[in-house]
Amino acid sequence: MTFFALRRSLPALLTIATASWAPPLQAQRETPRVGISVEQIGQWGCLDCATGHQFGGIADLVVTADGGFHVLDHTAPQLRSFDRTGRMLRALGRTGSGPGEYRTPIALGVEASGRTAVVDIVAARVTRLAPDGTVVGTVRLGAVASHAVARVGSGDLYIALSDFAAGVGRIVSLGESVDSLTPIVSSLDFPPTEVVRGTVYSMAVSREGTIAIGDGHQEYRIRRYSAQTGATSQPDLVRDVSRTPRTPAEIAELERRLGGRMAQMRTMVERQGGGGGRAGASGPAPAVDPLRRHFGVGALRYDDQSRLWVRTERGDSARTVFDLFDSAGRFAGELILPARVNVFHVAGEHLLTAGVGPDEVPVITLWRVRAR
């Protein structure tokens, strides 16, 4: 396993701002557009303010059907909750290992009762919070979480756990009424083109219980599993599209960032007892792939209509291209959003995105999504 591969499985530690690059928009001569209109409701973000809108590394976010939203910031580290007008309701968390404290939070889920659950990659645990922010319990993971998402509707968490040295991963679930992990997929080794076998870079869980897992590094392929049995349940979602080249500036910036993360990667591998050399985290970072991925970390989300949204890397500095698949798995077309998007979540008629403004300040944007 290479160091370059390992960094993609740890999005919270490796906040590489791919959306700050400015690749050319790929030609879309015959690709259909979905019949959806998007209207901006509000945008928040500031360089220095006392309103709770100063964001750092946004690891995850969740929007509710009424337009309220939660933002998980791993730089703080902190969980902030807002109403649909952007007014901050509460800010919870700080650095530490005690109850309600975080080391490196990477994922957030909102349960049906309104409780929130925060997955911490370094502390290797899930912290559960009541709607008022009170800590109601923690669940130990016992392994490194490479990714986690909530199931649409129920809010049950699905967590991908990775053994980097062995190249094997598994998926577990954590329901609202339980305090222990339930195995779902016991040995995950997908897809064959994945840089680190068994590591999940992007995952989504539909209301009906379909787990979509994708790795867009070399091939545009999304595999679907049953949340009940853990078996592959439907044909893979595949698109025959070309990867676009990175610019020399993009490659130089990525090499610089990778070089600066070597010590962090060694630390993460050593926590698993593998040793830096055994896991390939020692020595210089390998050469950067000159081609951009089809899609990257956290690129998949199901909406309430069981459409699968895929945040591709075919956009540019001012646009993000989403691919949408309908509930039957058919490609429905593209949605082009006039903004750079790093992280997103969709619920009801609301789409919430995290990106950067023209001055490179992190911003949160709330959109209304409607059928045309």
Image (cartoon, helix red, strand yellow):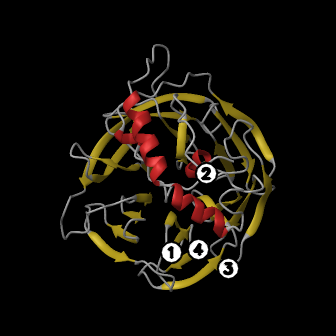
Q: Dot 2: few (<14), some (14–19), or many (≥20) neighbours within 10 Å?
A: many
Q: Dot 4: few (<14), some (14–19), or many (≥20) neighbours within 10 Å?
A: many
Residue 51 location, quadrant: bottom left
User: Which amino acid is tagged 4?
Assistant: Val
Camera-side mark, 2 or 4: 2
Q: Residue at x 62, y 65 (%)?
A: 156
Q: Of label 3 and label 4, which has the lower sequence position?
A: 4
Residue 166 placement (x, y as % from top left)? 78, 55
Camera-side mark, 3 or 4: 4
Q: Dot 3: few (<14), some (14–19), or many (≥20) neighbours within 10 Å?
A: some
The reply to whether dot 3 and dot 4 touch (C-beta < 8 Å) is: no
* Residue marked by disc 4: 126
Q: Of label 3 and label 1, which has the lower sequence position?
A: 1
Q: Is residue 83 left or right of residue 287?
A: left
Alpha carbons under labels 2 and 4: distance apart: 22 Å
Q: Which mark is residue 179?
A: 3
Look at the numbered disc 3 and give the secondary structure of its residue: loop
Look at the numbered disc 4 and give the secondary structure of its residue: strand
Residue 204 placement (x, y as % from top left)? 60, 50
User: Which amino acid is tagged 1?
Assistant: Arg
